Image (spheres, helix red, strand yellow):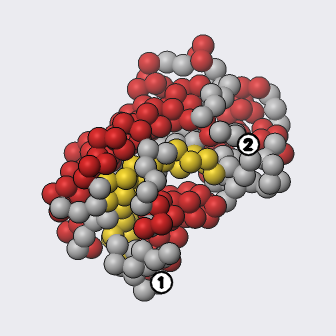
Amino acid sequence: MSLKGKVALVTGSSQGIGRGIALRLAREGADVALVDIKADKLETVKGEIEAMGVRSTTFVADVSDRDQVYAAVAHAEKELGGFDVMVNNAGIAQVKPLADVTPEDTDRIFRINVNGVLWGIQAAAKKFIERGQKGKIISASSIAGHDGFAMLGIYSATKFAVRALTQAAAKEYASQGITVNAYCPGIVGTDMWVEIDERFADITGAPKGETYKKYVDGIALGRAQTPDDVAALVAFLAGEDSDYITGQAILTDGGIVYR
């Protein structure tokens, strides 16, 4: 598989899964536009990518702002000379019993996890159509987009919504040669899971690390997931070998949720 000559944009790419995806796409030969709200960390990832001999550019944007997402896509095309792959990776977690969820909680997580994906789908599809070419749109769902998890109810709702957007967009854009898919990670050893574990500890009284260990112990393949595990699936979805796959939300969790 090679992405040589392709231009990819990855949101939430300053750390964690997003960084892993950006580095994997670069290793496959793609030039990568990095988008996040954390400018300093973006520059570090940019340096890592350029050390591989491919091009990279950075753009600071909040994906909950539609205009900023469109501007990020325009920047990627201008700076890297094309646009082929959109990875809507940016997202946040929220651990809270449903009884305690506030309107502010719901508004924030939906603006980032759902609206941010919608704006990314819109902006990418519009750019592909303007350029008269096929394209790949790949978004972050989760195992929580297949099963609703206790204390993660609103987060789960956002990830179910990503699956719905993925299916609808796949049907709407298929005639333009645009495929739309999602990846569904499980328990990944990133800062997000450190935060989730800490919030579970606060709510349930469990010792820090116990919730993470409990979930990892339930993985059939016997280990926590790494960003590289997720990135391998995204790289496949970004390449030609996945040209006949669209509208799917593919589980990559080591064996937790089965569909």
Residue at 23%, 63% (x, y): give it. Answer: 133
Residue in the foreground of this view, choosing between 157 and 71:
157
Q: Which residue is mark 1?
A: 52
Question: Tags 2 and 1 in contact by the CB under 8 Å rule?
Answer: no
**Image quadrant assignment for residue 209:** top right
Q: Which residue is mark 2?
A: 256
Res 248 seen here: yes
Compared with 2, 110 (above or below) is: above
| Residue type, numbered disc 2 | Ile
First in residue order: circle 2 vs circle 1: 1
> Residue extending furthest top?
99
Compared with 130, 212 (above or below) is: above
Q: Position of residue 112 (x, y in %)?
A: 41, 38
Residue at 37%, 53% (x, y): give it. Answer: 179
| Residue type, numbered disc 1 | Met
Res 22 seen here: no
Q: Spatial distance from mark 2 to mark 1, Cα to Cα?
A: 34 Å
Is 148 displayed left or right of 135 in the figure?
Answer: right
Dot 2 crowding, Cα within 10 Å, few <14, some 14–19, many 20+ = some
Q: Position of residue 117 (x, y in %)?
A: 38, 43
Residue in the foreground of this view, choosing between 13 and 42:
13
Compared with 32, 182 (above or below) is: above
Is 203 displayed left or right of 222 in the figure?
Answer: left
Which mark identifies residue 97? none
The label nearer to you, 2 versus 1, is 2
Residue at 48%, 66% (x, y): give it. Answer: 241
Quadrant placement of the C terminus: top right
Residue in the foreground of this view, choosing between 1 and 34:
1
Element class at badge 1 = loop
